[in-house]
Amino acid sequence: MQVMVIGAGLAGSEAAWQLAQRGICVRLCEMKPEKKIPAHESEYFAELCCSNSLRSDQLENAVGLLKEELRRLDSLILRCADATRVPAGGALAVDRRGFAKMVTEAVCSHPNIEVVPGEVTEIPEGEVLIATGPLTSDAFAEKLLDLLGRENTTLNFFDAAAPLISFESVDMDSAYFASRYDKGTPDYINCPMEKDEYLAFWKALTEAEEAPVHGFEDGQVFEGCMPVEVMARRGEDTLRYGPLKPRGLKDPKTGRESYAVVQLRKDNADGSIYNLVGFQTHLKWPEQKRVFTMIPALKNAQFLRYGVMHRNTYLDSPRLLDRYYRLKTQPRLAFAGQMTGVEGYVESCASGFLAGVEMARRLKGQPPLDFPRETAIGALGLYVSNESVGAFQPMNINFGIIPPLDHRVKGKRNKNAELSARSLQIIDQMREEVLT
Ligand SMILES: Cc1cc2nc3c(=O)[nH]c(=O)nc-3n(C[C@H](O)[C@H](O)[C@H](O)COP(=O)(O)OP(=O)(O)OC[C@H]3O[C@@H](n4cnc5c(N)ncnc54)[C@H](O)[C@@H]3O)c2cc1C
């Protein structure tokens, strides 16, 4: 029994691992390092494109629940993320390179996985799991369009990455370590701005020159990953209610909240690299340097990587896929990751997990697993394949796609905690069957 997995991103690496763990021989085809998608820099698999955060790790948050489900079901991506985590308050953030290296080593050393380097340009025969991501190579994307039909099978939006800077270039006389409302450990560097500094920065940001991105003029951005300059143009205070929110951050020098605060999060375990939280951008690179160094603590910032923006392509999955991310017309072909319209690192991993586990079970003649809508893994697959969803948009996991409780609970946090407890109880009951 052999499966070809195409693409060793977050979804493809997880899927290959789950198949291999169940005794299936996997040929994992990855075009790196020979050819890289525009958002990738390193030679490793499972490279994170922008933020190094896998978002909240709290069970009152749906992405925290999705992570915990994957953890309990022996996800490779979660195991590597936990092992390479860097402090980030209630979020699970990782050492970007350390994480990708660990995933790569685990995948490459698995006895049931053969890594086949090079770009795939044809749809192979046999059992295939396609996880080539939002920036699937052009030649392969053409073949997918031939297979799926050119009209209305793929959709697009735009996704941007934030810059990285060196820690040593941050002026710590103007910045301070703290977490919002002093919750947990002081993991973030906070760069405060007074009103006049903020207004000058905001004005420069709204007027700065953007890099041309083909199709972006008439394209849509994903609200969860909006470029900072697009957000700034929505109004003078929009950023102060978004990524530059000063609430709960008292500047130790003044003892009060500043007018606006830019936060920096550790990007590697050494703490030598930081990323600008919420600063995904597609400004021209010299403009990024000019405008972002107007933030007082970043006046001498050394940019290790500038922000970039890319078109992000995904399938109209409700019309094409079933709840296990298999092509309805040809179940020998499954898809996983961002290209199925799940949005985000953890969601991509979850779809790779489910698609991989299910393909292994089918090949071994085992019945499909019923991950119900009450679980985050199940809810995501059921949402993406729900034919009644009209204009399909990329979907982060959220409690809105999970059925409500059958009794009233006071307070959103308590309610979410109960939804998570209900789901984890189901996962624990299914665990043995899933892992067998
Ligand atoms: C600019 C940008 C910024 C983003 N920022 C974030 C963020 O901050 N947080 C977040 O959660 N998500 C972000 N995303 C979404 C992100 O892409 C996904 O969350 C995640 O990386 C998707 O995982 P994946 O496995 O589907 O695809 P990928 O991680 O892209 O993996 C696909 C793999 O397939 C390989 N490949 C492609 N074509 C071929 C081929 N023909 N043959 C062989 N190999 C091939 C690629 O080299 C790559 O390794 C961003 C996306 C972009 C484009």
Image: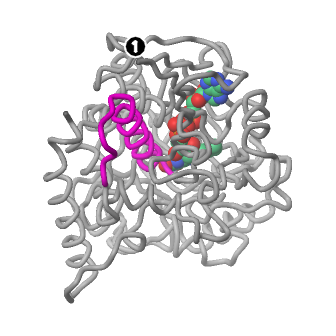
Q: Residue at x 79, y 37 (%)?
A: 146
Inspect the image, locate mark 1, and give the three-letter code of the amino acid beneath it.
Cys
Judge whether residue 353 is colored magenta: yes
The image quadrant of residue 435 is top left
149 and 61: which one is in front?
A: 149
299 and 382: which one is in front?
A: 382
User: Where is the N terminus found, in terms of image quarters?
Assistant: top left
* Looking at the image, residue 236 lies above or below residue 93: below
Q: Position of residue 245 (x, y in %)?
A: 47, 70
Q: Report helix, strand or loop for mark 1.
A: helix
Q: Position of residue 164 (x, y in %)?
A: 55, 39
387 and 229: which one is in front?
A: 387
Q: Position of residue 163 (x, y in %)?
A: 59, 43
In the rendered image, is residue 164 in sight?
no
Q: Position of residue 186 (x, y in %)?
A: 27, 53
In the image, the segment drawn in magenta is 344-370
User: Where is the C terminus found, in terms of image quarters?
Assistant: top left
Judge whether residue 309 is colored magenta: no
383 and 239: which one is in front?
A: 383
Does the magenta stretch mainly form a helix, a strand or a loop? helix
Could you classify mark 1 by the number of other residues whose Cα lies within 10 Å: few (under 14), some (14-19), or many (20 or more)?
some
Q: Residue at x 35, y 37 (%)?
A: 357
Figure disc tally: 1
- On screen, residue 372 versus residue 26, left or right, reads left
Q: Residue at x 49, y 16 (%)?
A: 27
- Residue hosting label 1: 108
Quarter containing ligand 1?
Answer: top right
In the rendered image, is residue 89 in sight?
yes
Direction front: furthest residue: 365
- On screen, residue 393 versus residue 194, left or right, reads right
- On screen, residue 368 versus residue 139, left or right, reads left
